[in-house]
Structures are given as C-alpha cells and as structure tokens.
Amino acid sequence: MADKNKKEAQRQPTNEEQIRRRQSGPRPTAEDWLRQKTAPPTQTDGTAEFAQTGPETVPPGGKLPDVGVSGYSVLDEVIKREDVQRAGQILLKYKQGKANLEARIIDNEQWYKMRHWGQLNDRKNEVEPTSGWLFNSIANKHADAMDNFPAPTVLPREADDRAEAKMLTSVIPVILDQLDFEQVYSDVWMYKLIAGTGVYGVFWDKDKLNGLGDVAITKVDLLSLFWEPGVTDIQRSHHLFSVTLIDNEDIEAMYPQTKGRLGSSTVDVAKYNYDDAVDTTGKSAVVDWYYKKRVGGKTVLHYVKYVNDVVLYATENDQKLRERGLYDHGLYPFVFDPLYNVEGSPAGFGYIDIGKSPQTYIDRIGKAVIENTLANTRPRFFTRADGAVNEKEYADQTQDFVHVNGAGLGEDSIRPIVGKPLASIYYEVMQGKIEELKETTGNRDVNTGGHTSGVTAASAIAAMQEAGGKLARDNSKAAYRAYRRMILMVIELIRQFYTLPRTFRILGENGAQEYVQFSNAGMVPQTVGMTFGLPEMEQMTRLPLYDVEVSAQRASPYSKLSQNEMALSFLNAGLFNPALADQALLCLDMMDFDRKDSVMQKIAQNAMQYQQQQMLMAAMAGGAVPGGPPAPDRKGAEKAAQNAGEDRNDGFGGLQAQESRVTKKAREDTAERTAPR
C-alpha cells in the first residue's frame, strides 16, 4: 500500500489535472506574486498554483496575468466547455427552425442548373427537355444589377467632419477595389436571385497586409448561417452561428489543443447536390458563435470559436475584449439583402420561386410535343402474325430486297401506323406559359432589346425599355439599402482599427491621381468645448457620425444616353451662360434629375466668378461696375473744364487745373527765346 502511494505521489499529473487544480486552488494575490519573484528558484513538480507568464512588472491594479495551458486562460475563464455545449443545443434548435428554407435553397439550385427533372418526380424517360426561359430571366436580372453597380458618397452630419467625410468618399472605393468587391457583389446578386437572399459578411482580417489588418467582405452561404426562428431582423436574434467545414489536419495545425479531440462532427450542415463527388470525411464543423450582451448601458458583441466542445477562442476569455467586445459597432457582422421579404424570417424568396411553376408546365408541355413529334417522324407498322413479309428485312433500310413467304402478298400483311398530330391549341398553351413567365419575372421582350410588332422607332423602343425597367430599378434600390448598411459597417471598422496611417492612391480633382495618408485620427471621439479642469473621464466628447448616399457608379447605356442628351439641351438653351445664371437656377429648381444640386452649385459658382471678372475688368478700364453706379463721362467733364477755363487733362487719365491765357502766352514766348538756333 505504501509503495502504491509513493508511486502515486511521483506520477506526473496530466493537463486535465493541472487545469482542475489551478481552477480549484486559491487565487494568488499581487503580494504572493512579488514574493514568488524575489524567492530563489526551486524545482516544482508541475503543480504550482501559478507560473510566471508575462512582463516583469505587476499589471495595473495589482492583478496577475492569467495562466494557461495549451493556449487557454484557465484562471479567469468565462466561456468553458459547458457553455459551448449549451450553445450547441441552441444551434441544433436553430437548424431545425430553418429546415424548410434549406430544402428550398437546395431545390432552387437544381432549377438554376436546369437539373429540375429530378425535382419533378416524373417517370424517368429519355425525353426530358429543359428550356432556359427561367435561366434567361435570372441572367437578365443579374445584368441589370451589374449595369447599376453602386458607389458610396459619405456625408458628414456636422460641418467639422467634412474633411474626413470627403476622405472616406475617396478611400472606401479603393478599399473595395482591393477586396475585388465587384466580384463579391456579382456573386451575392446571383445567389440572391436564386435563393432569394444575399448575405454579405463584413469582418476585420488581422492577417491582411502582413499583419497590419484590413476590412474583409465576403459572400456568405445561407446554409452555413443559423439564427433564431421567427425574427425578421437578423440583429434581433439572441444568437447567431456560422458553421464552416475545415480539414482536421488544418485545425490541429492552427490549434494544437484540439489534437486527438476532433473525431466526428457534432453539427450536420446541409449540402448542395454537387456535380463532383465531395468527400466531407476527415472534416470537422468549426462554429463561429456570436451573441450580444448589455454592458454599461451599451450593446456589446461577443464571439466564440469552437469545434465540437473545444473552445478555440472567446472574447470574454480575452481581458482586452471582455468589456469592449469583438467590434465597437455592436452588430452581427452580416448584412442580409432579401429580394422579396416574407414575414417571420430575414430570408426572402427569389425569381426561381416565382418562375418555377410556369417553367414546370413549359417543360412538361414541351416534353409531350417532342414525344408526339418523335412518334410521328419515326415510321411504325402493323403486321399480321401469319403475314408473309420478312419484318427484319423490311425494317432494314439497307436491304434492297425483302423476302415474302407464300404465293402472294396481301395488303393486310403489313400496314403503316398513321400518327395523330397535336392540335395547335397545345402549342398556344405552351406559348401562353412562356408569356406568363416573362410577365411574372419582369423579363419582357423590350427589357432584353426586342420589340413588339408595330413598334420600330428607336425613341419609342427606348421609352418602352425605360418604362419596363421599373422592376429592375426597384430591385436595385433595395440592394442599395443593404449596400448602405454594409458601408456603414466598413466605416465603423475603419474607426476602430485604422490606428496607423495608411497610404492610398485616390482620384483627385479632374481625375488626377493623388497619394494621401489616412487614419482614424479624425474619426475617434473628440473633446467638445471647454472642460474647465474637469477630470478626463468627465470631459464631454463628440463622436463624428456619417451618412452614406449610394448612387450608380456605372449607369445603363440608356441612362447615359439620356443624361448626355439632357446636358446638350441645357447647353443649347443657354443654361450654362454665367450671364443668365439667375434664369438658369430658376429653371433647374423646377426640374428633377440625378445630381441636380451639383449642377446648380456649379452654375452658381461660375456666375460668381463671372461677376468678379466683370468687376475687375471694369475697375481696370475705369468703367461702371455691373450692378453699381454709372461711371462719370470723362470726355464731357474735360470739355466742360476747358470751356470754364479751370481744368485740363494731365496725361494720366485725370484732370488738373487750367492756367490763364496771359500765363500761357508768357510761357510760350520764353520757350521760343531760349530754344537753340
């Protein structure tokens, strides 16, 4: 028994035992830590209450740095294994709530790929036509969206923030261009048309730019997101989960504490019907868990990353972020952009859901028509069982001779089967379904460049295209609202993380390239007014706030043409003549077009410059100032002065006193006598 106790005492404790001992042991004080620092080093058995892991000074407030095993902060750990297990139960409940949505998204993907015959539950047949009417509608909607690619304009809410707003307006497009945001925007729009909802993920990637970090915007798959069932606004969900399948080898390389603890995944993510064989064995579901808390009167966003029941990272376990949270804006870093909203869900429905029914009947009627056509074009025959015709030779078109048994060949030995062609009504029904699909999806002929019979004038076709584009404009404006929310998130990330100056190449005045440095120095909270010696915590501060105005960076060709024609009509009407600025501003004030305020501002500036030039020219010429008192008549003044014998021109444009006749005669005589002969 004694030997057993001795061996037990000499045994090296495991990591789990160390964790339990450290969590259950008394918390060391600052004095204990100092005493440990000054004491001579001694050999321990690995079960010390704490270890020195930090700087050589006592932290502020006399608080010891947390001690961890394998990267964990176990002495002051808030999120533990039990917490992620409870989060896993919430995740499963959220997953059950969106089961119907996941099934619809997977089904819509098959319709988009024109593999929908497997979704119709029809008997397998060699005739399975798949017309692309629905695909054509989606492709045209996507083209309309990309024709109106958005661009942000940042506006300040206070006059003191105009310089920062102008800089943000120039810098944000550069950031988006470096992110290849046009491709992200295209992918989100296509997913939105198919699944009904596009989702942007707006994150801060600390590894970008060699560790400097920058904004990251990605397209997010709805199948990997899980939210509280019944909420319409994603920001009102109590929890939000994002699940990603990652190879076990990669997880163990990034997080060594997971080695030997992965096994099979506890979360089953819905999968698309891939064309390729996708093997998910050897992968584990890594969960990003977001939740909100109220701390100090504000909403704080917290974040936990875990796999199975192993905590990989948690903001509440990080002392720097425990009170602050992951992002200062306190919002889930996802922006939902539904095409058509539905009650009780942040996800909407798209054009696949709208055009699925007419497309079904188009293909079914087309299948019947094609089968009838094939049956009538392929000759078939009735033959008598006791007929004398060799059927094999008769069916073989390469045989020149067909043998017949018996003495004679009767007409009823073999007889062709006469097919019955379909009536035209069936074709008309199919055409009606095609027109229904065009109307319900807003993909009329005029929207794709075609025209109806009787309309041949270019102006009439253009007017019909503009009128038929109401649906596309409405969809684009809805996308702009989501884009605006995304840009506001980008601004908040810049405010939080752009602590060091960065250099950007922007377009300055008249399209000239400029290199500027930008940081968040002008965006952080600023002291307002006089503090009169108040403590720093009691000083009044102001947080610069901004609004975002979204406009089309690239308008459609028709919009460009109409705006160019409008500008030429303004020029021909003389609205750009600075002498007629008052009339031009009055006329433009009654009109309504894009960027009207900018045009009116430029006309007013040109008018002011014109008046200043006129005043300067008048002053140099000695003329009247436009709008001022008339200038005196110099010629008349000189003539009157001569008649009065008082003044004369001094040769410099001024008037001087006129001398008498006697003095003038004497001066002339003196000059004549003294002149050299």
Image (tube, rainbow, N blue to C red):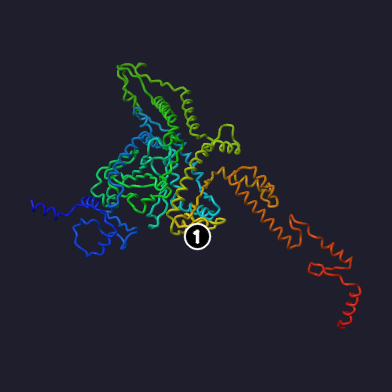
Q: Is residue 386 above or below residue 654?
A: above
Q: Nearer the viewer, residue 659 or 527?
A: 527
Mark 1, Cα crowd under 10 Å, few <14 / some 14-19 / many 20+, is few
SS class, disc 1: strand
Three-letter amino acid code at disc 1? Tyr
Q: Is residue 131 above or below residue 584?
A: above
**Side of 405 relative to 434 (left or right):** left
Q: Nearer the viewer, residue 473 or 386?
A: 473
Q: Nearer the viewer, residue 180 or 202?
A: 202
Can you identify the residue that label 1 sits on? 515
Q: Residue furthest front?
A: 533
Please state, as top left, top right, bottom left or bottom right, where the C terminus lies in the image.
Answer: bottom right
Residue 253 seen in render: no
Q: Position of residue 616 (x, y in %)?
A: 71, 60
Q: How many marks?
A: 1
Q: Position of residue 631 (x, y in %)?
A: 78, 59
**Side of 292 relative to 439 (left or right):** left
Q: Position of residue 444 (x, y in %)?
A: 52, 34
Q: Position of residue 624 (x, y in %)?
A: 76, 58
Q: Nearer the viewer, residue 266 or 542?
A: 542
Locate residue 54: give its quadrant: bottom left
Task: Write the residue at 66% across / 56% down.
Answer: 609
Residue 314 seen in render: yes
Task: Write the residue at 23% across / 48% down.
Answer: 260
Q: Is residue 609 above or below residue 106?
A: below
Q: Residue furthest bottom?
A: 677
